[in-house]
Amino acid sequence: MQRGFLKVEATLLGKIATHEARNITEETLRDALFQGLLDTEPARQNHVKTEDPISWHDNQCFSCTARPGAGRKKSHDVAVLPHTLQGVANPGLFCEVKWLKKHQHREGEIVSDVLRLTLSRGCAPEGDAIRTYLLVGGESKPFGQTLKKLQGAGVNLRWSPAGNQSSPDTMPADKQLIIQSLLHRANIGFEEFRTLMLFGRKHYRLPPDIWRHMKIIVRARWLQTNSGRSWRMALWEFSHWGVKKKRWSGAELARKFRGLHQRRRRRRTV
């Protein structure tokens, strides 16, 4: 994944050097990451994908037997599918990508990405689990503003140890993601989970089993300034090393969601 990040970094530097920074989009990052992963090991090219459909998309409704119909499936931006190469098993990876610009409010989309990664990662033991990453970049001001809003919503993505947007020599400490807190603390977490689960007008797919706690690790980051402007990017991994090993079954998670949903509906009618 490190080489994929370096490929994205090189692509962004090229855009900035030729005064094309305004043309940078999520597709720019996604395509560069895809190419970087291909370049890492050309023999696995059939396993590297973009817009890879999520495995739990077709789960039936948790309160009836309805299943999602035809249509565009929810997907991961970039994926390396599990495979074995020269006798070595590779569990694969999923990565979601975002590029932030001025006057955009995309913290909800990033919370959705984090939930999507957590659900797709499931409860496999750490050594066997597919690896999950979030790649976010953009202009420095909206980048910093978005991280601050995400921290308030329960997704503690950090750029520096102090939590500000300077660029010190040391990486920030690992942080925890507590899924129950994410669903409870702010409307943003609950609403994004509801949107991921919803299909049709009133059906909600049964979520997969997940871990209740995850660790957030900064794997790489980047800062570039040019003519008074600056851009930042970071790669976070969501892991399960060294955190509480408490499972949350799909049925339990569905009951928790249903209870929260009913309480919110009652409050709206009061």
Image (cartoon, rainbow, N blue to C red):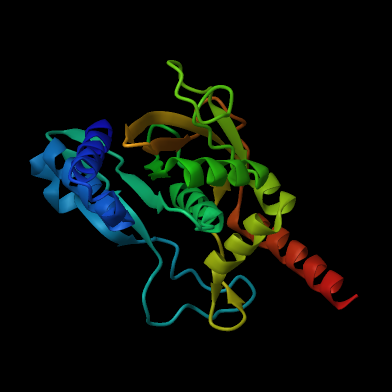
In the image, 262: left or right of 3? Answer: right
View extreme (right): residue = 270
Please give the name of the residue rendered at 50% of the width and 52% of the height, measured from the top-left corner.
110
**Quadrant housing the N terminus:** top left
Q: Is residue 117 visible?
A: yes
The answer to whether residue 123 is visible is: no
Is 87 displayed left or right of 80 in the figure? left
Image coords of residue 246 (percent x, y): 63, 38
Residue 247 x %, y %: 60, 43
261 over 48 or under it: above or below:
below
Relative horizontal placement of residue 6, taking residue 73 as reference (left or right): left
Percent position of residue 261, x then y? 73, 67
State the residue lying farthest toward the front. Answer: 227
- Quarter-of-image position of residue 202: bottom right
Front residue (pair 192, 150):
150
In the image, 123 versus 40, the foreground residue is 40
Residue drawn at x 49%, y 31% is: 159
Q: Residue furthest left?
A: 43
Residue 84 horizontal side relative to residue 213, left or right = left
x%, y% of residue 13?
Answer: 23, 38
- Residue under the image location 53 percent in, 32 percent down: 158
Q: In terms of depth relative to the viewer, which is nearer, 102 or 247?
A: 102
